[in-house]
Image: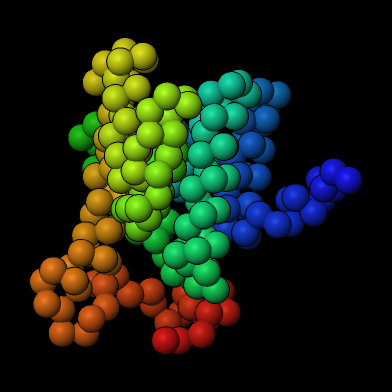
Amino acid sequence: MAQPVEQWITDIPPVTRVWVAASIATSVLVECQVVAPLQLYFSWKAAVGNMQIWRFVTTFLYFGQLSLDLAFHMFFIMRYSRLLEENSFSNRRADYVWLLFLTSIFLLIISPLLTMPFLSSSLAFALVYIWSRRNPSIKMSLFGVITITAPYLPLCLVGFSWLLQGGFNAAIGDIVGILAGHTYVFLQDYWPREMWSTTGKGEIQTPALVKRLFGQAER
């Protein structure tokens, strides 16, 4: 018997489910002309100077109009965000939300240097990178032709974007996502292992207030 849609939806971990639902809803609102992309993109002048603070959020929710490209992005979030939330961050919802928050802040800070009005793809790609680095032994097949290990996945995807979609400008969002993801992985995973951290923990610690808000026990 086919799994009911309701069960399939509730099986998606909560943070990933909210992000996917909000992203699809945003694209539907644009498609129905309730809002326009110009009202959703991020710029510091509009968000801060004009007090349009919703842009801090909507830039991470809009992946484009209802299309195959949107479905592709939703697949990536559903797969890699879900894998992270269910495995690396199992029973650590607050830590996962804090990861998304800090990665988003990083992208917002560097956005003026890159002319990237929407940062949703970069955030999603950062999660692909983090997952790939935390699962280095997993083997994957690309188009049923090439077999690679997980750490090479982000580089292959960047290469495909570069070759098939128009060069550097097409791949810049993915490259920025790799930069954001690598910054997190370095501070949280590599630093305590390679730099002889006295605590043995990563440099990124989720505030106690955030843990209490999401009901996560202190460790």
Q: Which residue appears at 43% of the width and 29% of the height?
A: 142
Q: Is residue 27 above or below residue 53?
A: above
Rendering quarter of residue 121: top left
In this rendered view, identify the residue nearer to me: 164 or 207. Answer: 164
Q: Quadrant of the C terminus?
A: bottom left
In this rendered view, identify the residue nearer to me: 193 or 20. Answer: 193
Rendering quarter of residue 208: bottom left
Q: Which residue appears at 32% of the width and 53% of the height?
A: 136
Q: Which residue appears at 26% of the width and 72% of the height?
A: 202
Q: Farthest residue in the left direction?
A: 195
Rendering quarter of residue 99: bottom left
Drawn side of residue 58 relative to residue 31, left or right: left
Q: Which residue appears at 54% of the width and 29% of the height?
A: 72
Q: Is residue 155 above or below residue 93?
A: above
Q: Is residue 49 visible?
A: no
Q: Is residue 30 visible?
A: yes
Q: How is the image coloured?
A: rainbow
Drawn side of residue 27 relative to residue 105, left or right: right
Residue 92, position as x, y percentages in the image: 50, 72
